[in-house]
């Protein structure tokens, strides 16, 4: 039964995925503009961030829209098609759930932030 449910949702994702990606491209917000020095500072801060995501996940699309609107250069890691990223997400975060933002602090500690609304709130509070 579980395999049948997975097959159903894979089929739905395969049919709706291209439309969702098209909608993402067509509804892109203009990124905020910063001075070159401010953008360099933001880019340095985002080097310690990584977003684990699926390409056609609607919640991941929501976070990617925020990344573009805030002009953030955060590494995107495909946890669906890359087994290495999937294993890292499960080992570090404790579960394979996307979107998940990996936040590496200056002292080397790592925080795994789940849920698109929480991720967007964090990004807006830190970079908005």
Image: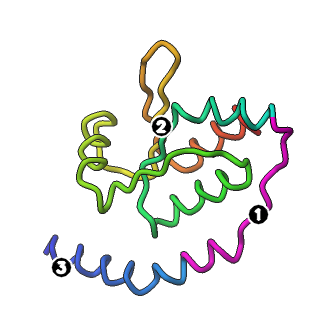
Is residue 15 positioned above or below 105 on the image? below
Q: CA distance from mark 3 to mark 1?
A: 38 Å
Q: Residue at x 46, y 79 (%)?
A: 17
Mark 2 nearby-residue class (10 Å; few <14, some 14–19, many ≥20): some
Give the number of callouts: 3
Quarter the N terminus occupies:
bottom left
Q: Would residue 74 appear left or right of 78 to someone viewing this image? A: right
Say if the magenta span includes residue 74: no
Tell me if mark 1 has few (under 14), some (14-19) or many (20+) residues whose alpha carbon lies within 10 angstroms of its own. Answer: few
Circles 2 and 1: CB atoms closer than 8 Å: no
Image disc number at residue 113 = 2
Residue 120, given in percent of the width and then of the height, sits at: 63, 46
Residue 42 x, y percent position in the rendering = 70, 34
Looking at the image, residue 35 sits to the left or right of residue 25; the answer is right
User: Callout 2: helix, strand or loop?
Assistant: strand
Which class describes the residues within 10 Å of circle 3: few (<14), some (14-19), or many (20+)?
A: few
**Region rendered in magenta:** 21-36
Per the image, is 26 magenta?
A: yes
Which numbered marker is on residue 29?
1
Question: Who comes first in sequence, dot 3 or dot 1?
Answer: 3
Q: Nearer the viewer, residue 48 or 27?
A: 48
From mark 2 to mark 3, how far is it between C-alphas? Answer: 31 Å
Q: Earlier in the sequence, mark 2 or mark 1?
A: 1
Residue at 32%, 60% in the rendered image: 80
């Amino acid at each position: 039964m579980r395999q049948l449910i997975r097959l159903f949702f894979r089929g739905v994702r395969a049919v709706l995925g291209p439309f969702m990606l098209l909608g993402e491209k067509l509804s892109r917000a203009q990124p905020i503009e910063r001075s070159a020095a401010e953008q360099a500072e933001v880019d340095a801060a985002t080097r310690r961030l990584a977003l684990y995501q699926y390409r056609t996940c609607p919640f991941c699309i929501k976070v990617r829209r925020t990344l573009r609107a805030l002009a953030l250069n955060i590494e995107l890691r495909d946890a669906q098609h890359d087994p290495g990223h999937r294993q890292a997400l499960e080992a570090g975060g404790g579960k394979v759930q996307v979107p998940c933002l990996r936040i590496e602090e200056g002292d080397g500690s790592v925080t795994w932030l789940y849920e698109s609304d929480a991720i967007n709130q964090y990004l807006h509070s830190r970079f908005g």
